[in-house]
Amino acid sequence: MAASIYQLSYKKLSQIIFEWQAADRASLLVLFVVMEVSLHWMWCFFVWLRRDTYGAYVDMALLYPLWFGVTLMGLLFLWMVGRLSQIKSDDKHLNQWQIVLITLYSTYVAVVILVMGHSSLVTGVSLVGGAMLGMMLVRRRYIWNAFVGHLAVIVAVSFVSYLGIDLPDLRQLTIAAMPLDTYSYLTYSETTSIENALANSIFQNGTLSWDNLHELRQSSAFFWRATHLYLALPKAIFIVYVFRTLLLILDNSKKEILQHANQDELTQLKSRRYGLTQMQQAIMSATDKQDFSVILLDLDLFKRVNDSYGHEVGDQVLYEVGQTLSSALTDKAIVSRYGGEEFLIVLPDTTHDSAMTIAEQLRKNIAQSVIKVDTAISVQVTASLGLYTLTYAKLAQIKQKCTPTSHTDSPKSTKTKRFKVQEKTPATAQNPDMPPMLLPSDICQYLISTADKALYKAKDRGRNQVVNANELFAEDHATNVPKSRYGT
């Protein structure tokens, strides 16, 4: 598929970056080159039309071969637009054509800049902008080599004129349409300074008026400055537009990536990783007088649903349960799919009694919901829940054990914050249900494993019920991590 101007829109550029094959991207790069060559061709045509006026500023004997070369290169690049798009599976052949393209374009741009006067504006736009655009569409190694080659050419051109070597130059330095001789060792900046000084001599009191505006238009300094703006600005604007579009595409892609990373695709709840991250943040941002409750929910005998109705029905059940949880909880709650048919519900700033009420209501909602598979089949499931509430007093004690300190093992990491274990205090020794903590992730694991122990008890007691881990602590100072997992 040959590239076209239509493909410069936001939607098409998005497809080019993420979906197009290498041959199509190379074809689009050649199309950009054709657009630039067309600008050069139109400049030559304009000067030829106005040769009676601008012939004094332009070396017409050099203009004709330049115009002929621009025409040939334009036709060649136009042919390459279709040629490159046809090379799909032959990577070796495509790489060879990319090298030819970059070599031809690099040589062409260097000649145009040299002949039309190596303006820093034109050179900078061509060197930096062209390299960035090329790296987006073709192999970066080829573009980098061309970039280094252009740097070498710039250095060579800057010094070769001082060796008495005459470089081709379309410019003729004039004042009032009278050409003046210049020396080959004059750089572009030096020649421009002379042109500006001669142009300024027509002003009275150093100001521009309507009387001398026409004389300014007749100066070569004005003509060549306009030429260099014509050569540089359209290309600069186009490149900025492309990269602005690229950044918009990347921003949207970032949002999609974060959404896929943070959201469980099946249930539309938060993913396990993102749920744990938000849980850690909620723990560390909890203030005084705020209890912290955690519910671990598991669907009872879910394997039978998959075995009896198939995994598609099982997926539908998981989705419906996720929607039930979302609709029954407030935005303050952190609801995530913890794994398989297991869900983690974090309730910041929620007392134990309120959490028990919420857990019991969730159990009833799931048990009462009927999931219709089709007109003849409907599925009902129940859930077991384990609940644990960490009081603000115990949470404050745990946070005190996560005291950040400066790590000074090496000079390079003096600003890095680390956590160190404090010595056990009498208060800690008197609370066997509160183990020593190192990091917020350890606090999360402690809360989840404690709720998991209560969930195991709910399964063991017959399922479809809520078990309170705080009551289990009151009955028996159990270990933090259960010795065995529950059965399904």
Image (spheres, rainbow, N blue to C red):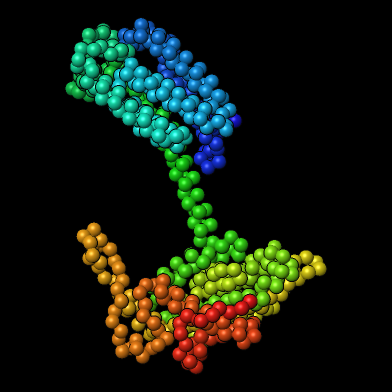
Instruction: Please say if 130 is above or below 277.
Output: above
Q: Is residue 56 visible?
A: yes
Q: Is residue 389 left or right of residue 324?
A: left
Front-most of residues 340 and 319 = 340
Residue drawn at (36%, 91%) of the image:
430
Q: Position of residue 274 (x, y in %)?
A: 48, 64
**Which residue lies most toward the right here?**
376
Number of marks drawn: 0
Residue drawn at (35%, 74%) of the image:
438
Residue 84 appears in which quarter of the rendering? Answer: top right
Q: Is residue 4 left or right of residue 119?
A: right
Q: Is residue 357 visible?
A: no
Residue 392 appears in which quarter of the rendering? Answer: bottom left
Residue drawn at (47%, 47%) of the image:
250
Q: Position of residue 437 (x, y in %)?
A: 37, 77
Q: Position of residue 67 (x, y in %)?
A: 42, 12
